[in-house]
Image (tube, grey):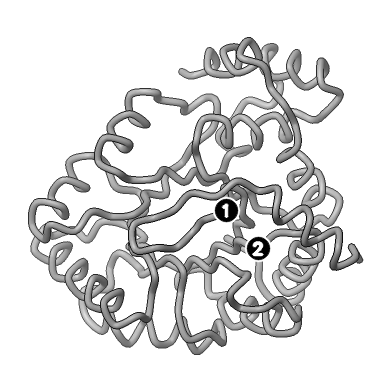
Amino acid sequence: MTSPETSSAQSANIPTFSLRGGAKIPLLGLGTWELSSDEGYDAVRDALDIGYRHIDTATNYKNESVLGRALKHSGVEREDLFLTSKLPGNTTERVREVLEQSLTSLETDYLDLWLLHWPPLEKEDAQRVWDEMISAQTEGLVKSIGVSNHDEEQLDALINATAVTPALNQIPWSPSQHDPQKLVEHTQRGIVVSGYSPFKGANLDATALQEVAQRHDVSPQQVIVRWHIDRGVVVIPKSSNPTRLAANMSAVSLTLSDDDLALIDGLAQ
């Protein structure tokens, strides 16, 4: 187990973004899709011991109670944590009930970020659900609200209908999926991009990626983590392996040159 002093120091080194609503999101977090039972509990405990403070889950992951127990047992103060959960996109009714269940399962009074996991099929449902999420934010049950898997047209539909801009959009992101114009369009709207499946979506054997990794004596995965941060994209790799968790954390201290970043950008398909 990592000492509290080391954990605090590592946590302090992770850059943050200020989101609409006031929450400060660390640019590196732990994704928890498919992490449940003892594996999920241990992964969160190990991650927090290493210095992670950003944990990403969802109602659909069915692991919130496991993660809540791990968070409680960790001894890390709630104000030092950043918790994200997601409302299922097919939840057009009982929105408040689902949120309250998430809070109960995670053993917390509020979420730092609550996302609409997928766009509802009907635009009318999207607006109504977003209105309820806005109400939850107004009441202090969540600090910031955002979306996941939304394109620019869907983002604008929410903004135009409610005058409230999502704080963040969580979408698949990796060197192979890099789209500078998409980043610009999100920035113009004041929306932070969070990327999921950063390794799954990448070609880890790509020559450019291997070249940069060898130059810095690190793994391709570590290069990808740092590349996300340098490009201003929140990255939430999933792992239950303590060694890999530590490697991802250490990538925060990696320094990539402009040439390195350009090579990785060039992998976009």
Along the viewing direction, whichever of 57 and 191 lies nearer the viewer = 191
The residue to which callout 1 is attached is 26
The residue type indicated by label 2 comes to Arg
Residue 115 higher or lower than 248, as above or below: below
Residue 133 occupies quadrant: bottom left
**Residue in the image at 46% along x and 74% along y:** 111
Residue 74 occupies quadrant: bottom right
Q: Which mark is residue 231?
A: none
Residue 183 higher or lower than 145, as above or below: above
CB atoms of marks 2 and 1 within 8 Å: yes
Q: Which mark is residue 53?
A: 2
Please provide percent x and percent y for residue 100: 39, 87
**Residue in the image at 86% along x and 58% along y:** 6
Where disc 1 sits, the SS reads: strand
Q: Taking 97 as reference, is 232 left or right? A: right
Q: CA distance from mark 2 to mark 1?
A: 8 Å
Q: Taking 39 as reference, is 134 left or right? A: left
Please provide percent x and percent y for residue 116: 32, 62
Q: How many marks?
A: 2
Quarter of the picture holding the N terminus: bottom right
The residue type indicated by label 1 comes to Pro
Please provide percent x and percent y for residue 257: 67, 16
**Residue in the image at 50% along x and 89% along y:** 104
Residue 137 higher or lower than 226, as above or below: below
Residue 194 higher or lower than 52, as above or below: above
Along the viewing direction, whichever of 173 and 2 lies nearer the viewer = 2
Q: Taking 162 as reference, is 19 left or right? A: right
Please provide percent x and percent y for residue 260: 65, 15
**Mark 2 packing: few (<14 Cα in 10 Å), some, or many (20+)?**
many
**Residue in the image at 17% along x and 70% along y:** 131
